[in-house]
Amino acid sequence: MTMSNTGGRRRPPTIHDVAREAGVSRGTVSRVLNGGHYVSPAAAEAVNAAIRKTGYVVNRHARSLITGRSDSVGFLLTEPQERFFEDPNFNVLLSACTQALAAHDIPLLLMLAGTKDERRRITRYITAGHVDGVLLVSSHSGDPVAEELHKAGVPLVQCGKPMGLGSKVSYVAADDRDGARDMVRHLLSLGRRRIGMVSGPLDTPGGVDRLAGYKEVLADAGIEIDERLVVSGDYSRASGEAGAERLLAQAPDMDAVFVASDLMAQGALTALYRAGRRVPEDVSVGGFDDSVAAIEATPPLTTIRQPYDRISAEMVRVLLAQIGGEDPAAVILPTELVKRDST
Amino acid sequence: MTMSNTGGRRRPPTIHDVAREAGVSRGTVSRVLNGGHYVSPAAAEAVNAAIRKTGYVVNRHARSLITGRSDSVGFLLTEPQERFFEDPNFNVLLSACTQALAAHDIPLLLMLAGTKDERRRITRYITAGHVDGVLLVSSHSGDPVAEELHKAGVPLVQCGKPMGLGSKVSYVAADDRDGARDMVRHLLSLGRRRIGMVSGPLDTPGGVDRLAGYKEVLADAGIEIDERLVVSGDYSRASGEAGAERLLAQAPDMDAVFVASDLMAQGALTALYRAGRRVPEDVSVGGFDDSVAAIEATPPLTTIRQPYDRISAEMVRVLLAQIGGEDPAAVILPTELVKRDST
DNA sequence: TGCTGCTCTGTGAGCGTTCACAGTAGAGAA
DNA sequence: TTCTCTACTGTGAACGCTCACAGAGCAGCA
């Protein structure tokens, strides 16, 4: 009999109740809540006390109805499910964005648009104004969804450099080219000369830039690019495995390989292991991202750290600024070489 | 000059515009939209045409203001960040729930409550009525958040059996005990007799049930339980590695091990490899979950498949029913043995 | 003819906010 | 005193929708 009842939820207190309790008008309560206006200290104190006493929480729907804002943002992932399942980077990004938004009391709506149908449905949802802005994560280039949302005037921040540089859509990215340079310089410093590369997709700026960094450093070191040492993947584990296999077949004397993502590097490790190559004794392996995959790999991967926490924080900052009326912005963040046992 | 302008968003059409266009009243449009009332075919057709023509989309805030529902649900994860980052099961669950909800046009709000502060903030947010219900994922037992939300009368469905069976909170779970039985029977059928187990946390029903299934089958087979062959972990990869190490030390003659999650099994594989044991020749390894981790493991893991798609679908179904006023419900779903190369 | 019941439709009220505006009180200057 | 300015407060209106109610039209039946 001491069990709590299921408790049909009672009517929550409104701004009216607070006003009555504090002996002021609705307007004053609203001003205390939203700030920026003249409010006497005494009134503010009374209102705050009344809020505490009544347990008042603003009704977001009523507010949104009049302001026209939803005070929520969407986190849109236009990747196939399988990529979401296997790549821990998404989780890191998702988690950091959620937290950065929580600091502003803004909820995050998860939108997974792996299929064409879902993309259509979600685009419709967003352009209907159900969210104030969108954080877009996509390894595809020139994402049609991005284009469409941008055209519809929806505030948008992309993670990673978008393809069409003409279109003025905001983005936040790590310095891919510089990170790649650091890694290849590191491999050179270990005395490696036959350095292969499994790049990302070459129709994306990220994929292109990392490859460019690789070629640049080799050229500077007076080593000519051997095309048999370069293949490309799609950031999936399987494509890393396949890529490393192809490299081994084309250039059996390869003594190091720079793989454009940790997940692909995991795959590459598997291929190397199967081929009987020891890592790092026979072949040094460098990854990119510094995700959980890098630490879990055997051996743990030397990699290029992408500052996902800062990337997320910047994405949220830029998005909120844009919702507030500011112009789109591009942010590039520095990377860092993390040495572990694979090199 | 052909570039699109950023397009300040214009005022969207309202139900009033649709009514005028269709030559009917607001009420009729609303009835067509929400169904369940008498509407003449002619009026319905006119309204639908008007909706198509104007591109009308309901204003959810206005609707919510009057109905008192938010038509959104929260996906609450009360796990530390690191667990979210390393365990792909969460992604599968998250993805499937998002899609199941999308079919009802209900957005999913992601709530990550890894720390105490976050839990407080989020509990407050939920009890304020900002979501209609909560899908709770937590490997902890008797989660205080669950308790609190349930007390507050918030519709709630937990993934996995909750600890306190007294509290009537809905849940959806796989049949842990039966799955464990299948796996141990399979190991026995391979001729293994010194079968170890790395269980889940023993303060959770899931952990307890899988261990119970293990013991039950061994007892039935006339094999007495050797406590040196049983250790427990916390579902993390690291704890699987540590667990297998301890088993090897305590019972070097172990010829099989049933690990209560695929992620822990991955860790166990690492430990076995380091100890020079061949899998499956020297030691058979069985996992649980059938997550991406099982496929990616070397060798790929024999495991017990949890039907995550059905689990998610049921969670959503039960939650919506409960929001609709029905009583809490418990659903247990069957598992399936998936044979791969580790046994 | 009048009554009942069924199908369908329009209307006003109200959900809980914010916003613009009007208004008050008191201080200081003319 | 009177006027102006600053600091602050209250009040209706509106946001876009749903809901309850009233009522219209029509068929069937006595």
Image (cartoon, coloured by chain):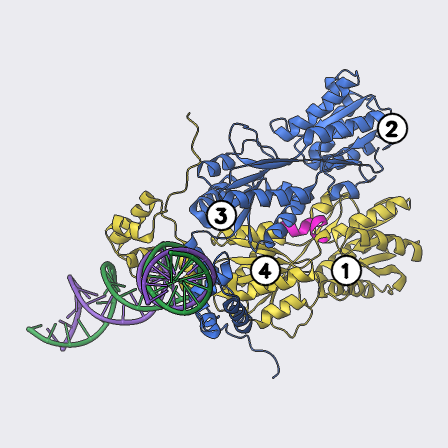
Chain colours: A blue, B yellow, C green, D purple
Tag 2's secondary structure?
A: loop
Q: Is residue B88 magenta?
A: yes
Give the farthest residue toward the bottom: A1
The residue to which callout 1 is attached is B200
**Residues rendered magenta in the picture:** B83-92
Q: How far apart are marks 1 and 3 (CA)?
A: 42 Å
Amino acid type, residue under disc 2 in the picture: Asp
Quadrant (top left, top right, bottom left, bottom right) of the C terminus of chain A:
top right
Question: Which sits in the foreground, B134 or D14?
Answer: D14
Q: Name the residue under label 4.
A: B135
Contact between marks 2 and 3 (CB within 8 A): the answer is no
**Secondary structure that dominates the magenta span:** helix
Q: In this view, does B210 lie to the left or right of B169?
A: right
**Magenta stretch holds residue A112:** no
Which residue was labeled with disc 2? A282
Q: In this view, does B118 lie above or below A286?
A: below
- Kind of residue indicated by mark 3: Asp
| Amino acid residing under circle 4 | Leu
